[in-house]
Image: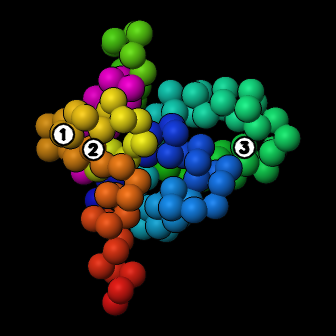
Amino acid sequence: MKVFLDTNVWLSATVFAGLCEAILTECHKRGWLLTTPLVQAEAHDVLKRKFPHLPQSQALFDAIWLEATCVQDLDEPADDNDVRLVKAASQAGAAVFVTGDRRVLTWAREGEMQILSPREAWVQLFASSARS
């Protein structure tokens, strides 16, 4: 299984305790994480601007991001990072793209890849194993 987490999911997971943190942890443990350098760049920008008082969040992000499988960024469309990330994930063979972005969630699928909210991803990927 390959799972691509949108930048906002990575950020939520490394700054706040909760569902996104659980998804990141479970995907990391299973070796399912895909990412791109664009996710890292976007996350670093937001962490520096909005959470400079939480340097441990950037350290946590970096530690886990370095262990994810990094796939190639796409250059086009230059003006829409969301499209670039979804297409990069799809081309890398991700089964699931997890995002909280309402616009991206309306796309529903990119090829064989499902686009799911964190709650939908948790239910689909981990809920049944949590009950066992």
Which residue has dot 3 on it? 58
Q: Quadrant of residue 74?
A: top left
Q: Quadrant of the C terminus?
A: bottom left
Residue 9 position, x and y percent, is 50, 46
Number of dots carrying numbers = 3
Q: Which residues are magenta?
A: 82-95
Distance in Å between CA atoms under marks 1 and 2: 6 Å
Q: Which residue corresponds to the image point at 61% horizontal and 34% vertical from the top-left?
A: 43
Q: Mark 2: which amino acid?
A: Ile
Badge 3 amino acid: Gln
Q: Is residue 15 visible?
A: yes
- Whether tag 1 and tag 2 are in contact, CB under 8 A, the answer is yes
Q: Which mark is residue 32?
A: none
Q: In the shown orientation, is residue 10 left or right of residue 44?
A: left
CA neighbours of label 2 inside 10 A, class few (<14), some (14 to 19), many (20+): many
Q: Nearer the viewer, mark 3 or mark 2?
A: 2
Of the image marks 3 and 2, the number of the one nearer the N terminus: 3
Quadrant containing the N terminus in the rendered view:
bottom left
Report helix, strand or loop for mark 1: strand
**Image height of 101 relative to 98, above or below:** above
Residue 131: percent from left, percent from top? 35, 86
Q: Could you tell me how far apart the alpha carbons at marks 3 and 1 are, in whole angstroms?
A: 30 Å
x and y percent of residue 52 in the render?
82, 35
The residue identified by callout 2 is: 115
Percent across and percent down for residue 69 are: 44, 47
